[in-house]
Image (cartoon, rainbow, N blue to C red):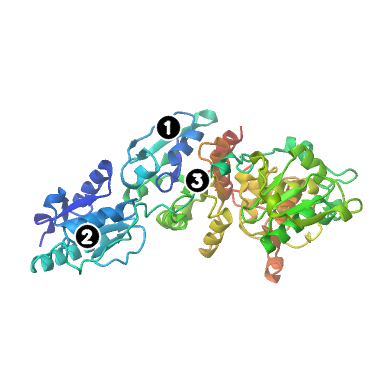
Amino acid sequence: MDKSKNPLKVALHGMEERTSKTMVMYLQGPCRGAAVVVNDSDADVDVFDADVAGIGKLMDEHRARKPRRPIIALSLRDGTLDHVFYVKKPVKTDDMLATLDKASALLKKNQSVSAPTAKDSSVQPIVEKSENANLKSFVLDNDERKKTAKHQAAMQLNEKGFNAFIGNVAGIDVNDPKQFAAARYNPKDYFQGHVESAFKISREQGEIMQLNSSWSPVIIFPHNNEIWLDADDKQLRAFSGLVIANTLDGKISTTPLTFESSSLSRSLDKFHSMDAFLWKVACWASKGRYPISIDLSQPVYLKNWPNFTRLLITPHALRISALLIRGPRTLANVAEVLNIKPQYVFVFISAAYALGLTGQARRESDALLVQSTEIKANKNKGFLSRIMSKLRS
Amino acid sequence: MSQYKIIFTGPVGAGKTTAIHSISDLPPIKTDAAASDMAKSKKSATTVAMDYGVMNLPGGEKLHLYGTPGQERFDFMWDILVTGGIGLVLLLDNTRADPFVDMKFFLDAFNKFIGDTAVAIGVTQMDVSAKPTIDDYQVQLSGMGLKLPVFAVDARVRNDISILIQSLLYSLDPGLEE
């Protein structure tokens, strides 16, 4: 039978005017007129968008008024409610047509029996009663929005700004392969090692802790992944770059903070995310060197992309990430493939390693892989380069 | 001259229109209409056709920026929209009931396009709802066998959107020079 000669009459719910018009065209076009959109009072079937806020209440009301009218729900999720035919988004024409057939069959079945009263106890609520079923419960935290440093956009360093901002180590050319063996550092000799240790303790114990030193205390809030420090970047950079192993080690401690102390009102603009803080501290300790625990002869992997929009972006960090995310490589190979100074690879690896985002590939197969010194260029490379130039201008 | 474009997609209220506005050289052409249903609870207007913006490049070339309609009912328009696209920017709203479902939905919906190009994911509203965290998103992606750039973004901030697009471009070709 040609369905278009006897189309199912459907009413649309939970869709605004423009989308309703699109749905009308969709039923006429791809669905070949198997259904036609009519007013609610004339409809045989109801079609709901099941993902909109408040739809539960709307469906309940319709169900109470028209208990025998079939319902089709367009949904992102698999549905489980009785009396509802689900079509998963994105809507596929075959699925829609099959569902319209089912609705039509149910309609005929329902028309052959007498309609129950509104008090019919067999009618079940068809969706959860939730005014905002699609919105999760959260409390708008105005304080969170005032933590400007925590949500601050990333600073993107270029090569020219690197030495001034990150610093370098006197007496070593970290970019000279012959001096690579000396181009490493031990994070434990620096503030970085103490920060890492304090973060670990705080997270493991789930307690607010204070990292004490002869400098400003760092208060660690592990549940919110944030720290509080009353110092600016200039001061932090200076302290992070100092070797303190032989001078301050005995004076540095991590202690739990009392409830009274942790509840003190603090300046909101001095909160930072733990990751962004440690990342910076590691960059300033590294000064373009790599961590002592990295074996230069072995490849390193990148577990996942760092959250760059909230981190200090060192030169070429995005490129290095894009390359390493494809597979493990030695640090020297990364520098060679990207044609960049090794110091940019070393500083990136230092920061990513501090956050646990990189590690040494230990599988024998990784070491055996022949690491290409070339990468296949994208066919639109010239155009992509011009976009990049524009974005970084 | 070839026409290149980047597609911005994501659920209602994720910031697609704003992101395009942040990066476009011209005021974007918006096709918002008064919102109803879910959209009304999130913002006063929602995109029912598509947004358009443009970046003017040296030499007179243009990069076109298209935003998909936020309401995820149909996919037939998306197929047309992605033709000629060089990559996808997926924006997710962290205040939604289950942003992971949204993420999976859009990654599935654009699966073929992403396979041919690349995708970068921006998570908005993290200053309103801090969880799930970016790490949580990475865990979900890892379960899907994916390693994608996922960044916290404020769609109003050009720098955030710029870094997101840069990660997309480097995913296409790490050999691009800064």
Q: Which residue is farthest front?
A: A260
Q: Are dots 3 and 2 in contact, CB under 8 Å? A: no
- Residue in the picture at 30% in, 61% down: A127
- Residue in the picture at 54% in, 39% down: A383
Q: Are marks 3 and 2 on the same chain?
A: yes
Q: Nearer the viewer, residue A236 or A140?
A: A140
Q: Amino acid at mark 1?
A: Pro
Q: What's the chain of the residue with tag 1? A: B
Q: Amino acid at mark 2?
A: Ile
Q: Which residue is mark 2?
A: A71
| Sequence-first tag of 3 and 2 | 2
Q: Secondary structure at mark 3?
A: loop
Q: Amino acid at mark 3?
A: Leu
Q: What's the chain of the residue with tag 2? A: A
Q: Nearer the viewer, residue B8 or A225?
A: A225
Q: Are dots 1 and 2 in contact, CB under 8 Å? A: no
Q: Which residue is mark 3?
A: A140
- Tell me where residue A113 appears, x and y as whole percent: 9, 69
Q: Is residue B98 left or right of residue A298?
A: left
Q: Secondary structure at mark 2?
A: strand
Looking at the rendered image, the quarter that the N terminus of chain A falls into is bottom left
Q: Nearer the viewer, mark 1 or mark 2?
A: 2
Q: What's the chain of the residue with tag 3? A: A
**Marks 3/1: CA–CA distance:** 30 Å
**Which numbered dot is residue B28?**
1
**Marks 3/2: CA–CA distance:** 36 Å
Looking at the rendered image, the quarter that the C terminus of chain A falls into is top right
Mark 3 residue crowding within 10 angstroms, few (<14) / some (14–19) / many (20+): few
**Marks 1/2: CA–CA distance:** 39 Å
Q: Is residue A60 above or below residue A241?
A: below
- Tell me where residue A40 appears, x and y as whole percent: 16, 50
